[in-house]
Image: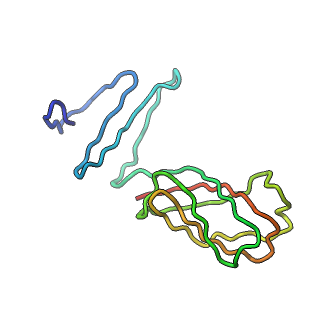
Amino acid sequence: MNIGGENYTGFSGVNLKNTAAIRLEMDGGFAGTISAKRSSDASREWILPDKSGTLPIMGTFAVQLPAGVAAFFSSAVTVSGIRAEDAVIVGLTTPASIGYDFDNSTAYILNSVRPTNGGLTLFFQNLGNATGYIELVGSYLAVR
């Protein structure tokens, strides 16, 4: 903790009240903020994992795939916070209403995922008789 240009490394029992933010500044100009804001009358407790490393990030995205594409193809999606060095797990689901009869066509198979800075590249296999475009909802979990 740095207060007034002085470093304090042996503090404990810090109690921040109301809306609170802790700013972390690292070597090389990297910085981040941990913040908490009251959203209800209930108390909250956050327990961080008992391990070294970083906390994962997760979220969702939507991707639209065209009909009649090549046997193997890729599609890029923008996902903020993702970096090229992340390890990523992606799951895809089909929304309830997708605009055509998905049951009578073959599925696009997700072969692999490559993280990029600010996005994901999804690599698919098309088994050949897709009858229309499809929109898929993806969920991801990434760790560094």
- Name the residue at 80% across, 65% down: 132
Residue 126 in the image: state x and y as whole percent: 71, 74
Question: Would you place residue 111 above or below residue 117 in this image?
Answer: below
Q: Is residue 136 left or right of residue 96?
A: left
Q: Quadrant of the N terminus?
A: top left
Q: 90 above or below 74?
A: above
Quadrant assignment, res 67: bottom right
Coloring scheme used: rainbow
x and y percentages locating residue 40 in the rendered image: 53, 23
Q: Which residue does the image show at 70% across and 64% down from the upper left?
A: 65
**x and y percent of residue 100 in the render?**
84, 59
Picture mark count: 0
Residue under the image location 60 percent in, 54 percent down: 139
On the image, the x and y values in percent for residue 127 come to: 74, 77
**From the viewer's perspective, is 105 left or right of 79?**
right
Q: Nearer the viewer, residue 88 or 28?
A: 28
Q: Which picture quadrant has residue 122? A: bottom right
Q: Residue furthest left?
A: 6
70 above or below 132? Answer: below
- In-front residue for pair 56/62: 62
Q: In the rendered image, which quarter contains the C terminus?
A: bottom left
Residue at 18 percent across and 31 percent down: it is 3
In the image, taking residue 12 as reference, residue 109 lies left or right, namely: right
Q: Is 142 located above or below residue 25 in the figure?
A: below
